[in-house]
């Protein structure tokens, strides 16, 4: 059997996180589709199993306790837009999912300035962890 390649790119990690989130939502009875990566800021479109709620989801992956975002995250507030942050090691063996409303991300996104560069980031809380009930 061939050995799995270990030099996984940032884009590959991001796609792996998208599929992990899609699988988790499917296990919870949701109707899920991933985008073709051509929808700005939307990785997954999901409907609750009872079809009463539908959301656009952006997925972010990190091995750190924070997640880098674009500046626009501070302005993106919609009751139909969510983030799912996936924290894991490089092998995605024990991912931790943080499900967060875009309004909270917009409010709590922080700015870090370093040598002329601006970095926007969000640090999820324990209350965000496995907060899948937002979608029910």
Image (cartoon, rainbow, N blue to C red):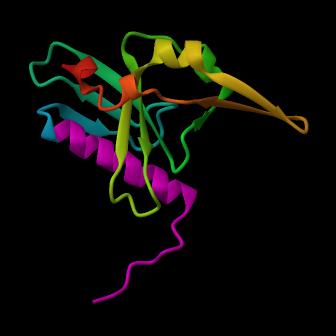
Q: Nearer the viewer, residue 52 or 39?
A: 52
Q: Main secondary structure of the magenta part?
A: helix
- Hey, which quadrant is residue 93 in on the image? bottom left
User: Where does the image place residue 32, in percent across and percent down from the top left?
Assistant: 23, 35
Residue 85: % across, % down: 44, 36
**Would residue 20 be found to the left or right of residue 76 on screen?**
left
Percent across and percent down for residue 20 are: 31, 48
* Membership of 21 in magenta stretch: yes
Asked if residue 8 is positioned above or below residue 80 in the image, the reply reads below
Q: Quadrant of the N terminus?
A: bottom left
120 relative to 35 in the view: left or right: right
Query: What span is in magenta?
Result: 1-26
Q: Residue furthest bottom?
A: 1
Tally of numbered discs: 0
Is residue 134 located in the magenta-colored stretch of the structure?
A: no
Q: Residue at x 45, y 78 (%)?
A: 5
134 or 80, nearer to the observer: 134
In the image, residue 32 above or below residue 5: above
Q: Identify the image quadrant of residue 108.
A: top right
Q: Residue at x 22, y 21 (%)?
A: 133
């Amino acid at each position: 059997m061939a050995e799995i390649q270990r030099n996984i790119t940032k884009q590959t990690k991001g796609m792996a996180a998208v599929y992990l989130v899609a699988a988790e939502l499917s296990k919870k009875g949701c109707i899920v589709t991933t985008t073709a990566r051509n929808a700005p800021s939307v990785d997954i479109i999901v409907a609750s199993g009872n079809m009463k709620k539908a959301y656009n989801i952006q997925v972010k992956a990190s091995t750190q306790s924070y997640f880098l975002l674009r500046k626009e995250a501070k302005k993106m507030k919609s009751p139909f837009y969510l983030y799912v942050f996936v924290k894991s090691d490089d092998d995605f063996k024990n991912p931790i999912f943080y499900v967060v409303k875009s309004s909270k991300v917009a409010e709590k996104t922080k700015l870090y300035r370093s040598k002329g560069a601006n970095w926007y980031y969000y640090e999820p809380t324990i209350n965000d962890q496995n907060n899948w009930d937002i979608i029910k």
